[in-house]
Image (cartoon, rainbow, N blue to C red):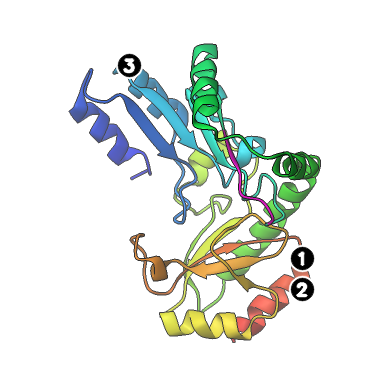
Amino acid sequence: PTAGDGLRRALDEAGPGGVSLLWLESPTNPGLDVCDIAALAARAHALGALVAVDNPPATPLLQQPLALGADFCVVSDTKAMTGHADLVLGHVAARHPQHVESLRLWRTRMGVIPGPMEAWLAHRSLGTLHVRLMQQCRSAMQVAQFLAAHDRVRGVRYPGLPHDPSYAIAATQMAAFGGVVSFELESADAVARFFAQSQLVYEATSFGGLHTSAERRARWGGDVVSEGFVRLSVGLEDVQDLLADLAAALR
């Protein structure tokens, strides 16, 4: 089954007028499932619902939800969009002018306006988005291939791997597959040893930065993942150095 099967069933059960907004995250965090945005948007619109897509792992560079039929695209610019781990910011884009005006009016009334320094940092970072993110995509593919072949690692997920459940959909709607890889080790203790032995992987909860980071997601208790589940965000280190570090940490 694909990541969108449950959503399609829920929309069918709701029927016309039974839902006002379909909110998608694709690829999902942390499982990296990919939804068929165009198909789900068409079904939601047929029922009279609006569609919003949470798009931080891909950014608009790798995936353009509005072009696939979504009404809104929401991005945490804190992550890969600005990529330097020095900014807390986000944005929403809308397909229809009336929605843009409604959002702008709400933002003005609520006062959620970024400061000049935050705006400057964001614009500084956007100039290197393509260079940063495409390099992270290339490195993430090599990391995913390495982890998938490692005997101490299981459950590797990366939409760019041909055997990944999300590959078929991701290949049609994403320009590249992002810098995030997820995998499982045998236990929470195994993850702790992995972090202790690695010299390049920072333990951090955000992703998309210049430096490779990872976290054991089960520590938060909100995701349905194993105790040894790791979400790894590949940075801009030399990929051979990173692979060597991962190999040493897994030993």
Q: Mark 2, residues whose alpha carbon is within 10 Å: few (<14), some, or many (≥20)?
A: few
Q: Mark 1, residues whose alpha carbon is within 10 Å: few (<14), some, or many (≥20)?
A: some
Determine which residue is flagged by label 2.
241
- The answer to whether mark 2 and mark 1 are in CB contact below 8 A is yes
Nearest to the eye among marks 2 and 1: give it: 1
- Amino acid at circle 3: Ala
Determine which residue is flagged by label 1.
237
Q: Does 203 lie within the magenta span?
A: no
Determine which residue is flagged by label 3.
46
Which residue is drawn at the image coordinates 39% and 66% (left, top)? 220
In the image, 29 versus 137, the foreground residue is: 29
Which residues make up the magenta segment? Answer: 86-91
Q: Does 88 lie within the magenta span?
A: yes
Which residue is drawn at the image coordinates 49% and 31% (left, top)? 110
Instruction: Find residue 136 and name its label.
Output: none
How far, Cα to Cα, is label 2 from label 1?
7 Å
Question: The N terminus lies in which quarter of the figure?
Answer: top left
In the image, 73 versus 91, the foreground residue is: 91
Res 217 quadrant in image: bottom left
In the figure, 33 relative to 93: above or below? Answer: below
In the figure, 195 relative to 159: above or below? Answer: below
Query: The residue tagged with tag 3: helix, strand or loop?
Result: helix
- Amino acid at circle 2: Asp
How far, Cα to Cα, is label 1 from label 3?
46 Å
Query: The residue tagged with tag 1: helix, strand or loop?
Result: loop
The residue most toward the top is 98
- Residue 70 point in image, percent of width and height: 47, 25
Q: Is residue 46 left or right of residue 173?
A: left
- Residue 47 point in image, percent of width and height: 29, 18
